[in-house]
Amino acid sequence: MDETVIREVAQLIVEAKGRTAALTGAGISVESGIPDFRSPGGLWERFNPMEYATIDAFESDPGKVWQMLRELSRVVTEARPNPAHRALARLEELDLLSGIVTQNIDNLHQAAGSKNVIEFHGNGARLRCLLCGHMEDARAAEARFATEFPPLCPYCKVALKPDVVLFGEAIPEDAGREAMRLVQRAAVLLVVGTSALVAPASYMPIVARKMGAALVEVNLEDTMLTRDYARYVLRGKAGEILPRLVAAVEAQRSAAGPA
């Protein structure tokens, strides 16, 4: 990776004075042991998403869908934040990152210390009752799997559902509204580990660019953003690039002295 590019992006972030936001996708969590669902060996290779990951399937046969959800829950609850998650948390701590919009459901940004995280697709660490809204920690439900599968709401006695967006469900209104507000205000948008193919999250980089934001793409490979929208492309693993970027940001801040 060209250190000149790292320094230029760091300068952009410093000059943006807190008007930097991030959009993250599956690629940022691969280094935490969570495979991209669409990649070889991913969840969709073993479970047809149209059969196991739709709200209609859950409502008609929650026990069947929970065969897939049990594996998803295990992967999510065992994962730990990697250096990329911690780097974004550090940027927020420095008051240089206004927030993160994540398409991931793994809770790793929060575990790394990030405070303003907009969960576009929900959070797999929580379970929710579709009838009464009761919420429960996923780990607590896992402890009951041997005697209760699928896990049931203690009040309604119906199957609990991970608090994630299944196919056929709408993005939570609050999350959609807050995400759009965040990217519209951004002077810099870090797009990390996402293919930018899944709508409506895929619209956000385009909206940010049209509002004048500088797009910085961090990914292993080219995406639909690379040629037409990204001002800077940092090619490689997020867990290696983002810590270097934060180090460059801190070096520039230190060199500049007190504001």
Image: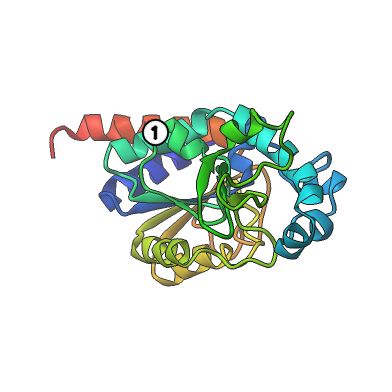
Q: Where residue 211 sits: x, y (%)? A: 39, 70
Q: Which corner quadrant of the image does residue 82 belong to? A: top right
Q: Where residue 36 sits: x, y (%)? A: 71, 43
Q: Is residue 54 left or right of residue 236?
A: right
**Label 1 sits on what residue type?**
Gly
Q: Is residue 157 visible?
A: yes
Q: Is residue 235 visible?
A: no
Q: Where's the N terminus, which quadrant?
A: top right
Secondary element type, mark 1:
loop
Q: Is residue 181 left or right of residue 44?
A: left
Q: Where residue 145 sits: x, y (%)? A: 71, 32
Question: Relative to 116, is 228 above or below?
Answer: below
Residue at 35 percent of width and 38 percent of height? 91
Q: Is residue 80 left or right of residue 178?
A: right
Identify the residue under disc 1.
Answer: 113
Please state which of residues 96 and 61 is positioned toward the viewer in this rendering: 61
Q: Where residue 74 sits: x, y (%)? A: 68, 32
Q: Give the color scheme: rainbow, by chain, secondary structure or one colour.
A: rainbow
Residue at 83 percent of width and 39 percent of height? 41
